[in-house]
Each structure stands twice: as C-alpha cells, then as structure tokens.
Image: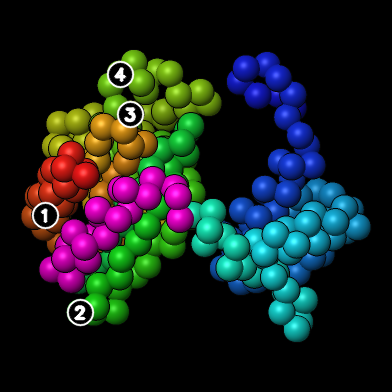
Amino acid sequence: MSDSAGGSLSLTLSRGIELLERVCAADAAPSIGQVAQQLGIHRSAAYRLLRTLEAHYLVRRDEAGKIHPAAGLTNLARGVENSLQTVGLPIMTKIADDLGMSCFIAVAQGADCFTLVTVEATTSHALTQHPGTRHHLDRGAPGIALLSGLTPQQRADIEDLELSNKAQADLHRALRDGYASSFDEVIPGVGSVAVPLMAAGQLPATLAVVYPRQQLDEAHIAATLHRGVEAIVTRLGRA
C-alpha cells in the first residue's frame, strides 16, 4: 500500500480508520464479527482496533455488543471547515424551512464527496443526509455540482477520478444549467438538487437538498440554493 507521494502507509491505522468509517456509515450498529468480516481481518485484530478507538471515545459498544459512533467524534468534527459550517447553518436553516427539505453542505476531498453538515426542515418530516455520508464525485447531484465548480485543470488533477459517459453528460448539463440534479443515485428513492459553493480558503463545496421523489421545479430549487451560496460567500468574506 502506498500513498500518492510514493511513501508507505500504516496498514493498521488505515484499517482502524476504515473500521470507524464503516461504523459511522452503517444503517444498523454492527457487531465486532461483522466489521472483522467487512475488513477481511481476524476477529482478534478487529477487537484490538476497536479497543483503541474506544480508548479515544470514538466508538462505544452497547449491552448487546453492537458498535456505535461515540462522543469523541464531535471534537474531531468541530474544526473541519468550521467557518463554513458556522456561517452556513442559519442560511441552510432558512432554505430547509422554505423548501421543506433537508439542506446540507458537502465538500470534496480527493475523488470523494463528504457531507459536512445537515439541517432538517422544521416545517415537515424531511429526509436526512447524514453528516459523514461519503460517495464518489462522479455520481449524485452533490458530486457533479462539486465537479462543475472546479476548473478543467482541477478536475484533471484529481487522482482516481474516471468519469463514465453518464457522469460526463451530467457534468456537461451542470456546467450549462448552473446546477446538478439526480435521483436514486446515492440514496435509493431519493432526489437531490445541488449547486457549487466555492469560497476562498475553503474546500471545494456544494450546497444541496434531498427529498423523496416527486415532481418539483428544480430550477426554482437551484435558484434558492444559489442565493444561499451568495449569502454564505459574502458572509465568509466579512469574517
């Protein structure tokens, strides 16, 4: 295993991080046997990784032995693009309530799209895009919107990013329309509209919403998101 600079990586650390990612992304809390199987390692090795993560309060086990994310993750997440989260939250709250949808910011790291922060609508029972949700940039409205906000050279510089014919067509439409939309690509039965959010000093980002499949005016949603982006970028410039 090697990194992009040619140096070796710590296999143990990599497996520990992967264990943490799987626990955080799981719909149902897994057992130690399940994560060992997912990681392709012996149960005893998975247990040592688990005990280390527990010692740092990053995971916890319930009475049934199921593994859950723990409170220590809050401290790790607090500093991630903190200014973007702080400035974005009140604007996202208004968008979520106005549209009756969950609004979220996702950022690009490498060839992946990570949900940074989510606000649920208080006016209705909205779907939720959980913070920490991760998927490749080449699918889903958030990923395509992120790509559309990058320059051609920035897109070319992303390692391990190979766009399918569909992704290339989606990107072309996003560049033309100023927003991306998708359905059933990241979360089954869920649609999304997203616009790029590019602010100086911040990771490339997107402002997006998710909702159950229905006939909606995507251009109206995109216009609302673009106004949100403008407000966020303006406030970041004043910070």
Q: Which mark is first along the chain, 3 or 4?
A: 4
For disc 3, the marked residue is 168
What is the crowding at mark 2: few (fewer than 14 residues within 10 Å), some, or many (at least 20)? few
Q: Which mark is residue 198?
A: none
- Looking at the rendered image, the quarter that the N terminus falls into is top right
Q: Are marks 1 and 2 in contact (CB under 8 Å)?
A: no
| Dot in front, 3 or 2 | 2
Q: Which mark is first along the chain, 2 or 1?
A: 2
What is the crowding at mark 4: few (fewer than 14 residues within 10 Å), some, or many (at least 20)? few
| Residue at position x 75%, y 69% in the image | 31
Rounded to the nearest angstrom, the CA distance separating label 1 from label 2 is 17 Å
For disc 2, the marked residue is 123
For disc 4, the marked residue is 152
Q: Position of residue 204 (x, y in %)?
A: 33, 35
Residue 221: image quadrant is: bottom left
**Along the line of sight, the residue nearer the viewer: 134 or 235:** 235
Rounded to the nearest angstrom, the CA distance separating label 4 from label 1 is 26 Å
Q: Which mark is residue 224?
A: 1
| Residue at position x 40%, y 52% in the image | 116
Q: Are marks 4 and 3 in contact (CB under 8 Å)?
A: no
In the image, the segment drawn in magenta is 78-98
Q: Which mark is first along the chain, 2 or 3?
A: 2
